[in-house]
Amino acid sequence: MKKTDDALLFSEFYNCYYHTVARILEEARQCPLTRRQIEHMARIHGHDESALYIVPKLIRGDWPFLEPDPSGDGRFRSVLNRPLFPQPLTRLQKSWLRSLTEDPRFCLFFTDSQLAGLKKLLADVKPLYRTSDFCLFDQYEDHDPFSSAMYRKHMQTILAAVSSRQFLSVSYLSGKGNIISHRWLPCRLEYGQRDGKFRLCALAVRKNGRPRLDLLNVARILSLKETGDFCPRPVDVDRYLDRCLCREPLVLEITTERNGLERTMLHFSCYQKKVERLEDRGTYRCTIYYDTRWETELLIQVLSFGPVVKVLGPESFVRQIRERVEKQQILTYDYKNREKRS
């Protein structure tokens, strides 16, 4: 198979729509589905707009994979009588997986036996890219110790606790140097690309019985112990995080120069945001709702885009931008003067 054909198979045959339709057909093969159930599956397994695109084609018969159930109750069943055939990995997928295995963070999410199996499977595969092919800038150097055996053990204990909703007894070193021992329910892991750190969103119960969501740096965890106590229902993490969002969102005006919109959307993908086009100016207005605890990091991210992005508000954020730019000008001026004197 040629490389172009391989890439086409990867992007078309294995894309999100294909997997979404496959899940719908497999479910409808076992039990007929209503249109509402099909729309729900399309939204869950696809994108927000998937239900608008996929469902009509399946219901109308443009894609002849579903048919009305003979019961006449408005449900639909799959025309397939057998499970879908297994999907072998393409060369491109294997090459991409081989590259991922070289990432120092990769081993955090797999056991030794799983890593050995992957290594054997991909032994003769050439990596799609090497870590050394990338030059990263504007990042901190004190990343988490991904290669540490204790760090990896803590990560896998946390991942298991998130899946099973088990409380953990944690000994934690705070930012002020104090050792805190407490029971937390791990809910979600987050990763900061700029500082190279994993953070754990964990639920704690106050003495008055009211829950609170804490953010723990995984590298600061000294010890973990399973408690055997489990939370009976899933925790709505987003509801707790919304309480930490700023009252006044950050408003940016983004130009189309140097792929400004694509770059900023990728860079700010982890934030809640709303984007609208300003027809009269040919630019875009982006409103970002962020956690106030990470305002400084967001400030640095905005500055990294230079003239491509203009901060419209709030005034407190604009003031911080001005102060940072003025300090940078002073530092640049002093540096040039020292160079001249030397």
Image (tube, helix red, strand yellow):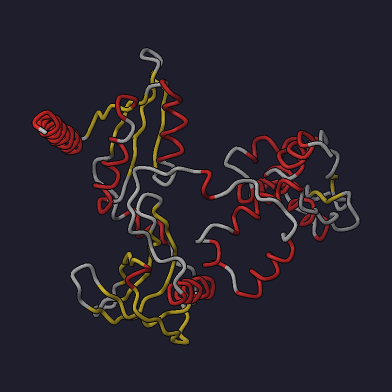
Q: Residue furthest top?
A: 280
222 w.r.t. 68: above or below: below
Judging depth in this view, the residue of 71 and 2 nearest the camera is 2
| Residue occupying image coordinates x 24% and y 41% | 248
| Residue occupying image coordinates x 77% and y 48% | 90
Q: In the image, is 313 to the left or to the right of 128?
A: left
Q: Residue furthest bottom?
A: 228
Where does residue 93 sit, x and y in percent of width and height? 70, 49
Q: Quadrant of the N terminus?
A: top right
| Residue occupying image coordinates x 39% and y 56% | 196
175 w.r.t. 302: above or below: below
Judging depth in this view, the residue of 107 and 211 nearest the camera is 107
Where does residue 113 sit, x and y in percent of width and height? 66, 75
| Residue occupying image coordinates x 34% and y 39% | 288
Numbered circles on residues, count: 0
Q: In the image, is 31 to the left or to the right of 222?
A: right
Where does residue 289 sit, x and y in percent of width and height? 33, 43
Q: Residue furthest right?
A: 81
Judging depth in this view, the residue of 184 and 265 nearest the camera is 265
169 w.r.t. 299: above or below: below
Image quadrant of residue 229? bottom left
Q: Quadrant of the C terminus?
A: top left
Where does residue 84 sit, x and y in percent of width and height? 84, 54
